[in-house]
Amino acid sequence: MSDSSYYYSNTGRTLENFVETIPGSIRTPYDVLPKVDSTGDLKKIKGIDVIVTSVRNLLLTSKGSYVFDPEFGVGIHRYIFELFDDRTKDNITNDINVAIRRYERRAKITTNVRKMKGGKKGFKVDLDIKYEGENRSISINYDESLLKDG
């Protein structure tokens, strides 16, 4: 069978063909980071590392900045200079949880938002991520340094 006849005989199975050609198992998330590893190849990650990267990207992206999906992101940086009271904490937590429910349903993620220590303006987001028996905790600081240019 020639390559072209294979292509035309399988056009109805495009998604299935794609899934069969991606590396790794179907149940294990797999991604490539824009970083070069020690072998000179792009760094490959899988499993919970993919989930952590996805959540971190989601939380650090402002809504409207991703052209192909303007709803992607959380945009909670806008709360940095707000008074950190229970209402602000609840709004931040809600914004994060809504985005996670929409874009990252593969893992169980719990969110804790707390005020920055040391008199800094801003807050800290702690996330506990559970996926396929693995646990990972990450923290992201949202303070005025996040808004400064390079």
Image: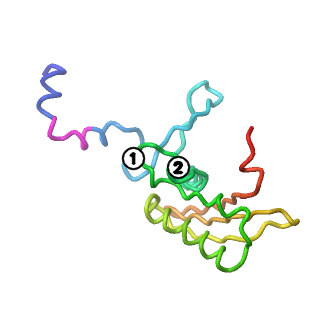
Q: Please give the label number shown on residue 25.
A: 1
Q: Residue furthest bottom?
A: 86
Read off the magenta span. Answer: 11-17
Earlier-in-chain disc, 2 versus 1? 1
Question: At which x and y percent is residue 136?
Answer: 62, 60
Between 56 and 47, the one lying in front of the other is 56
Q: Quadrant of residue 3?
A: top left
Task: Report whether 108 appears left or right of 117.
Answer: left
Q: Please give the label number shown on residue 4.
A: none
Task: Report whether 139 appears left or right of 19.
Answer: right
Residue at x 14%, y 40% (from the top left corner)? 12
Q: Quadrant of residue 15?
A: top left
- 102 relative to 145, above or below: below
Q: Please give the label number shown on residue 50.
A: 2
Residue at x 40%, y 38% (from the top left corner)? 23
Mark 1: secondary structure: loop
Please check the rendered image and state whether residue 2 is part of the magenta-colored stretch, yes or no: no
